[in-house]
């Protein structure tokens, strides 16, 4: 079976500074894969090579046998990092989502009634239909992430690419986003994403690529999330704990104590506020508050 996406021996750098070296991987239709690795490992650069936003120095990124070579394809939907978006741009949720139609049909002076109807259907699918007329700046982080996901889905992509989709949101929202991506994958959508959250990746993403300028390992989480592979990927001593079928990953404890680093820190203290005199304290819930030590 021919892969949907192939990265063939790709090398890439910025101003002669190498970022990726001889990277090869492929994705089949219906696959849900994640890229993990430290900051500066080349994860976002690899996504942009697949998207056609960058051109490799050597090698090739290929979409169903056709070289991408720096050309953007309407067959790939993209959800960028929230930190890269200009939230002051005067645009509503519906207008952002309708930008996804441009990827397939090109620019036009207006959107058809069918386009608007489909945009509303996607917004309802992602449970943000009531926000269509709201400015994107007025949304929570999780809502903003869903808006850009809706934009990508409106292009009817063969491949959905997401750069840190759970960055900048709380744990509950991150869990919701990952379950939403799993639902889309069960419907047949191919997904490639980056993430720094190893524990969330282990619990939600069935195929993981450990990347640090080159591919260290790839496979299901229980095969690639080993102490040896993760320590090589992050160039730091990592620990992996298996508990009740779950994988828990963390950096090994530091070889020093807090007291050794900050022997005399400024601490908070509890302040007791008496009522009517020193011997008449308020109830505990009313008389205890946190303050900074003098």
Image (spheres, grey):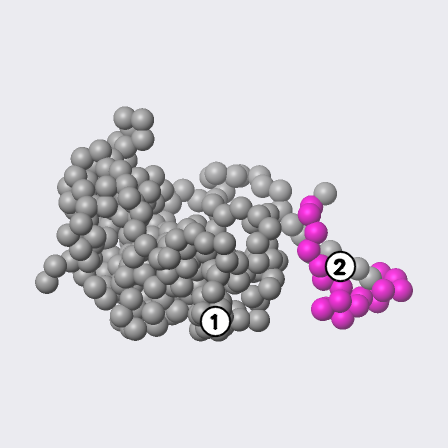
Residue 15 location, quadrant: top left
Q: Residues within 10 Å of mark 2 (few under 14, many from 20)?
A: some
Q: Is residue 167 magenta?
A: no
Span shown in magenta: 275-293
Q: Along the line of sight, which residue is nearer the eye, 244 or 94? A: 94
Is residue 222 visible in the rendered image? The answer is: no
Q: Is residue 281 magenta?
A: yes
Q: Is residue 46 above or below residue 119?
A: above
- Residue at 21 percent of width and 52 percent of height: 63
Residues under numbered marks 1 and 2 in contact, where contact means CB atoms less than 8 Å apart? no
Q: Residue furthest left?
A: 1
> Which image quadrant is residue 17 in?
top left
> What residue does disc 2 label?
272
Residue ID at (57%, 54%): 91
Count of number-bearing discs = 2
Q: Nearer the viewer, residue 64 or 172?
A: 64
């Amino acid at each position: 079976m021919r892969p949907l996406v192939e990265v063939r021996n790709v090398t890439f750098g910025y101003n002669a500074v190498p970022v990726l070296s001889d990277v090869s991987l492929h994705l089949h239709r219906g696959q849900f894969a994640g890229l993990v690795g430290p900051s500066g490992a080349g994860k976002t650069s690899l996504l942009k090579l697949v998207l056609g936003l960058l051109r490799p120095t050597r090698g090739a990124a290929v979409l169903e046998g056709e070289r991408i070579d720096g050309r953007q394809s309407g067959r790939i939907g993209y959800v960028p990092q929230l930190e890269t978006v200009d939230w002051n741009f005067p645009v509503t949720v519906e207008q952002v989502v309708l930008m996804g139609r441009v990827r397939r049909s090109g620019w036009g002076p207006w959107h058809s009634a069918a386009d608007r109807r489909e945009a509303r259907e996607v917004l309802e699918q992602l449970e943000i239909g009531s926000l269509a007329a709201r400015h994107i700046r007025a949304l929570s982080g999780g809502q903003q992430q869903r808006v850009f996901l809706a934009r990508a889905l409106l292009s009817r992509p063969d491949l959905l690419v997401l750069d840190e989709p759970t960055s900048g949101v709380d744990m509950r929202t991150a869990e919701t986003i990952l379950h939403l991506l799993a639902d889309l994958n069960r419907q047949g959508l191919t997904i490639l994403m980056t993430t720094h959250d190893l524990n969330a990746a282990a619990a939600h993403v069935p195929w993981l690529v450990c990347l640090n300028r080159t591919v260290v390992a790839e496979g299901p989480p229980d095969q690639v999330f080993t102490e040896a592979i993760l320590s090589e990927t992050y160039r730091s001593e990592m620990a992996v704990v298996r508990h009740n079928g779950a994988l828990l990953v963390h950096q090994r404890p530091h070889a020093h104590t807090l007291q050794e680093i900050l022997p005399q820190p400024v601490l908070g203290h509890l302040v007791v506020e008496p009522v009517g005199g020193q011997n008449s304290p308020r109830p505990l819930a009313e008389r205890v508050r946190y303050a900074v030590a003098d």
